[in-house]
Image (cartoon, rainbow, N blue to C red):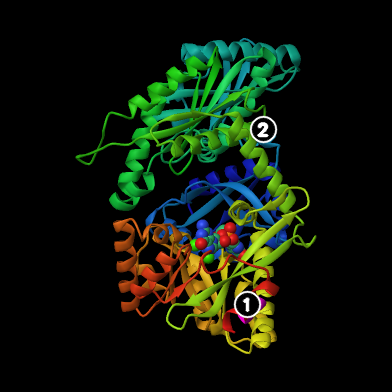
Amino acid sequence: MTNRQAATRDSVHQLFDAVDAISVQGYDEERRVVYWNVGSELLYGYTKEEAIGRKLEELIIPGSMREEIIAAHKEWVDKGVEIPASEIILRDKNDRDVNVFSSHVMFFDASGECEMYCIDIDLADVKKAKAQATLRENLLKAVFSATPDLFFLMSEEGVVINFHAGDSKKLYAMPNNIIGNNLSDLLPDKIKETLSVNTKKAIDYGDVVSFEYDLEFPSGVSYFEARISHLKDNKQILIIVRDITEQHNSAELIRKQAYFDALTSLPNRFLCLDRLSQMIRDMERNSEKFAVLFLDIDDFKKVNDSLGHEVGDKLLIEAANRLNQAVRKSDTVGRLGGDEFIILLRSLTDYAETVTVVENLLKIFREPFGIDGRELVLTISIGIAVYPDNGVSANDLLRNADTAMYQAKASGRNTHSFFTKDMNDMVLRRLEVEDQLHGALERNEFEVFYQPKFDLKNKSIIGAEALLRWHSPKLGNVGPDEFIPIAEHTGLIVPIGKYVVAQSIKFLVEWERVSQRNYTMAVNLSPRQFRDEELIGFVKNSLDSAGVSPERLEFEITEGVLMIGKSYVDDALHRLHDLGVQLSMDDFGTGYSSLSYLRQYSFDILKIDRSFINGITYKSEDRSLVTATIAMAHSLGLCVVAEGVETREQLDLLEELGCDIAQGFYLSKPVRPGELIDFQYTKDQ
Ligand code: C2E
Ligand code: CA
Ligand code: CA
């Protein structure tokens, strides 16, 4: 490592040693900890002594993310592909989640060695503003405590008596022209003034006075810090000047990484939230209105997937430029991540004014984007929340603008939508459901219903699908379409899902015992459950202890799970398959249905979504799709289930088309366990 590099690192360390509001960690090429500040100790629970020498992935990276992080780090070290700043959930010493905004900087030195620095800001911490302030304060402290490079001894009038320069290249004047001259005469005009003011201060207050300035050298701009002391007894002035160009640049780099989006250079989520909070404080005082705009590019994912990330990145940069040009200087345009942007519109007089700005934003997107010789047309959807009408906290405003954006998407995209009372009710209802969902399992509010599945050839029941029901004493019956997504979002689906598995297996045993026949039990699995490392073990244990053989349990999985494209999903699916349980692709036809998924993941069953079954008797497209799906599934050796069968005609047609299994209200609604057992008896007799 060269000295120059060592100096950079020292100053980086100094800069963060005393910062406890931000965690800064340094890692060598092998991802071993080489630096660990107090903030890291506070955030992650490991002391410096515990952390140094250990590997990043052993300390704070959750198991499921390890491979990905190691690979990303390697890409950076080997190919210079930066790890972008992002919001991420890490782990502390006690295995608790830590939600941080994490930015990264890599220092490479001449010999090719490098160190990565992670700057993690605790998002749970409301002291974000404090962190920012401390960062600035420590920046200064670090600069002040640094070793000076140039010394000037002068009379109280400023005439140089002696000087010392470790490196004469740092001198602005010719070395032989310094002694005997007034220092301020040797410097450019803009610094003269500062120098004399500060010198006077040092003499008047008897304190060390320091200031920073920059000088233009043929090689570029250098930054300096001067500290002035009055040597009263000698009637002399001592000025110590230090070159702080490197600190300046690395601090600038770190500041940029922490607060600005690397791709578009726009303020990032963290800085936007900070500005939003600041705006709220300003407006509170002036009782003014302002608007928070949440923008999302329509169908960006499609562009990205079909034309590649490079084109996607160029589009985002161009979109950022256009947005920036369309607003006033006092407004903020930021990037929240992905294709989501935010705009803060200051001091509005009325709603009409917002509409004008918003329509203009929609308009500037009408002009096609010229990327790599291609003309692409992009549109955006905009959600608007107005302070204070739609919220008085940063979180509420952002959430409500987001909700309004979804409304804009739902009403056809390329449009805007204000947050309304209905949306407010929706958000409140969601919060209420979420609130009641906590502890619902412990309070025994769930019940599993079963909907039988019929074999179309033998005309007999061959199994059932377990469907969860929730009777909340406060909210009444809440449908799974409403509470499952919330349980999913909060992670509550993990214990709830286990409950469904356990109940279903228990009932299967009972059902088979009473009817003396074999059935298969289908259970729905949500995306979030795949991240649960205990899932496979739990399923295996439940089957083993109930003495049920695995192929009699079936998991219904929607394509959405496969679209996540994460390795843990692949892993869990393969392990479930190896366990011997059956895999069923649910809601087939609704997503980006693709044959490759079916082949890749060894599915056994394909469930055609009920929206297609609904139309088969009167819509030729639906009938064609169902016919084609059955043929295709059979050619892949899959069993086909039609769900949502509501009429005799549908049932007959499905039979004719060669569908294997049917399920739906026409045959039976989902029923309580006892009812299903009785149902079986009457049907068979
Ligand atoms: P799904 O997996 O598509 O389940 C089938 C849904 O269709 C059930 O709604 C069922 O009651 C309904 N259904 C059955 N036959 C007919 C019919 O003939 N016509 C019509 N219109 N509907 C019919 P349900 O019980 O409200 O469940 C809704 C969704 O909630 C399920 O959709 C599933 O995605 C989810 N869900 C339910 N229970 C669970 C669970 O235990 N775990 C997970 N992860 N998701 C569940
Ligand atoms: Ca299902
Ligand atoms: Ca379905």
| Residue extent of the magenta highlight | 677-681
Q: Earlier in the sequence, mark 2 or mark 1?
A: 2
Which label sits on residue 660? Answer: none
- Which residue is at a point 65% across and 44% down the rendered structure image? 430
Q: Residue 221: x and y, percent?
A: 43, 27
Disc 1 secondary structure class: helix
How crowded pointer 2 is (Cα within 10 Å; few <14, some 14-19, many 20+) is rated as some
Q: Closer to the camera, 630 or 126?
A: 630
- Number of marks in the rendered image: 2
Q: Residue 670: x and y, percent?
A: 60, 66
Can residue 315 be seen in the rendering of this structure?
A: yes
Locate residue 257 relative to residue 154 in the image: left or right.
left
Distance in Å between CA atoms under marks 2 and 1: 46 Å
Judge whether 167 appears above or below 626 on screen. above
Tags 2 and 1 in contact by the CB under 8 Å rule? no
Locate residue 680 relative to residue 168 in the image: left or right.
right
Beta carbon at label 1 within 8 Å of ligand 1: no
Residue 432 falls within the magenta-colored stretch: no
Nearest to viewer (mark 2 / mark 1): 1
Disc 2 secondary structure class: helix
- Which residue is at a point 49% across and 15% down the rendered structure image? 352
How crowded pointer 1 is (Cα within 10 Å; few <14, some 14-19, many 20+) is rated as some
Residue positioned most to the left:
373
Can residue 31 be seen in the rendering of this structure?
A: no
User: Which residue position holds label 2?
Assistant: 129
Q: Closer to the camera, 395 or 449?
A: 449
Q: Amino acid at mark 1?
A: Val
Q: Amino acid at mark 2?
A: Ala
Which label sits on residue 539? Answer: 1
Judge whether 574 appears above or below 270 on screen. below
Quarter occupied by the C terminus: bottom right
Q: Residue 305: x and y, percent?
A: 34, 52
